[in-house]
Image: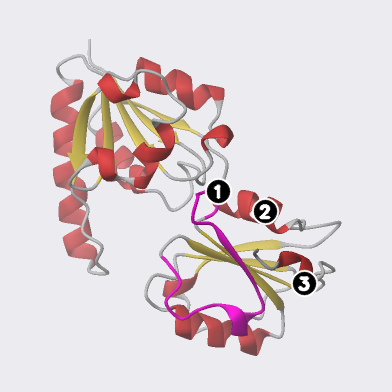
Amino acid sequence: MTGVFYGIGVGPGDPELMTQKALKAIRASDVIAAPGENVRETTAYRIAVRAAPGLERKELLPILMPMVMDRSVMERAHRRGAEQIERVLLQGKSVGFLTLGDSTIYSTFSYLEKIVKKSGFQTVYINGVPSFCAAAAVLGIPLAEWREPLHIIPAMHRLKEELSYDGTCVLMKSGSHMKEVKELLKRSGKQVCMVENCGMASQKRYTGAEQIPDDAGYFSLMIAKENNEANPKELQDD
């Protein structure tokens, strides 16, 4: 028998937001994988190890994933990573791939899962609390009400477009383009809040595009609303 390949969403940063199903999948995994050179140094592992007893004793499998925009380079990395995982699965061991937030939203697991599943192995998505839901809770605002649409946008891929959507826009994956993203937000006329490192010890909150630093970290998420009734003063960090 071959093992199962789990994509385990560990939530946005607060270990208390990890689901019971995620913890169960970690217990069922013989090997724990994560993107990076050192699994223990990944943000997802650092979150999970604080909530999952025994995780620190699991066998670890680092999957190298270059942070590049070249699709051909990414696809080669995905194939290499999938081959690593398949070798473990053929030994009858199950692999739990840790991913931030939810495993179905902009997750490296989804690319690997397609290849592994096509090879005939069993794969399972384990949902986690999405970062934008946690960020809205931190800011004390609803994401959407009544008939408002909600748009999840990979910001770094949409810099040439105007933010002309009705309702609430969530901007993720800003990368090193925060300055351009801020200009996009300013032109939109929407009311903007941002959470950096949501649920982590270094969490910060900002109100207004002009308050967002150009060098905000990788784990920064912006929420742009048409009718945000939250008092900006209440959203300032201490």
- Residue at position x 77%, y 72% from top? 233
In the rendered structure, are the residues bearing label 3 and label 1 in contact, judged by CB atoms less than 8 Å apart?
Answer: no
Residue 93's place in the image compared with 123, above or below, is: above
Secondary-structure class at tag 1: loop
Residue identified by numbered label 2: 138
Q: Nearer the viewer, residue 132 or 123?
A: 132
Amino acid type at image mark 1: Gly
- For the residues labelled 2 and 1, the Cα–Cα distance comes to 8 Å
- Residue at position x 54%, y 57% from top? 203
Q: Any magenta on residue 194?
A: no
Secondary-structure class at tag 3: helix
Please rate how many residues cluster around mark 3, counting C-alpha atoms within 10 Å: few if below 14, some from 14 to 19, many from 20.
few
Amino acid type at image mark 3: Lys
Q: Quadrant of the N terminus?
A: top left
In the rendered structure, are the residues bearing label 2 and label 1 in contact, judged by CB atoms less than 8 Å apart?
Answer: yes
Is label 3 or label 2 in front?
Answer: 3
